[in-house]
Image (spheres, rainbow, N blue to C red):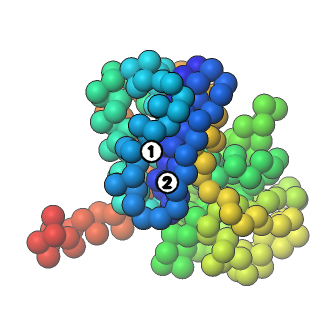
Amino acid sequence: MKLLAFDTATDVCTVAVLLDGAVHERREIGRRHAERLLVMIDEALVDAGATLRGLDAICFGRGPGSFTGLRICAGVAQGLAFGADLPVVAVSSLAATAQFARSDRVLAAFDARMQQVYWGAFVADADGLVQLEGDERVIAPSAVPVPAAPNWIGAGNGWEPYAAPLRKRLGDRLQRWRAGCYPSARCVAELGARDFRAGKAVAAEQALPVYLRDDVAVKNGENKRRHGDA
């Protein structure tokens, strides 16, 4: 299988090419996603000795996460897929973070600002690939769902500012949380490959971001138009 995967939902810009089992990955930290994403994609394809038109599909991190980051990621996925006539596979950025943690049970959290987190609980299947339990949501750290089973690992940048209220809420269900977990493009590719085999690829125009906080995105757009910014 030949896949291009990328994610820009957080401060990390990550790109990978999965080529018949081998992974060629690039990662940068910062807020230069719009400037760097296409460059990193070109570099990863060259490293892999692959071409865009020779791929089977494009996998992208559909969110949740930074509104700007999600628009960049979905826009690039659409543009490349249209140009190369490729299908796309949308992968949860929370799931890609949980996959990166490499644990049986992962509570993935991103900082959603406004004293909230983007939240999802993931359990690894027999192949070591995570599956979502319940729903992804945007929620206060003090109100996250408490899982029935014990021995969960926390992962994602939402744990850094909200570790105390999350620990208090989860109690003995939480084993520990891991710093430095992020949506890896390698993991986007791994999860995307599973979904591609399951027939979940869609046409380029369906490469859409998932904000979870759609009402805020709408309000932000209305405010920009009101002040002449759009």
Q: Could you tell me which quadrant the N terminus lies in?
A: top right
Q: Could you tell me which quadrant the C terminus lies in?
A: bottom left
In terms of depth relative to the viewer, which is nearer, 148 or 83? Answer: 83
- Asked whether residue 139 appears in the rendered view, the answer is no
- x and y percent of residue 34 in the render? 34, 54
What residue is at 44 percent from the left and 44 percent from the top? 40
Q: Is residue 34 left or right of residue 30?
A: left
Q: Earlier in the sequence, mark 1 or mark 2?
A: 2
Q: Residues within 10 Å of mark 1 (few under 14, many from 20)?
A: many
Q: Is residue 116 left or right of residue 86?
A: right
Q: Amino acid at mark 1?
A: Met
Q: Quadrant of residue 194?
A: top right
What residue is at 48 percent from the left and 78 percent from the top? 114
Residue beneath disc 1: 40
**Disc on res. 132:** none
Q: Quadrant of residue 202?
A: top left
Distance in Å between CA atoms under marks 1 and 2: 9 Å
- Asked whether residue 164 appears in the rendered view, the answer is yes
Q: Is residue 62 left or right of residue 122?
A: left
Q: Secondary structure at mark 1?
A: helix
- x and y percent of residue 14 in the render? 53, 49
- x and y percent of residue 165 in the render? 70, 80
Q: Residues within 10 Å of mark 2 (few under 14, many from 20)?
A: many
- Report if the CB atoms under discs 1 and 2 are less than 8 Å apart: yes
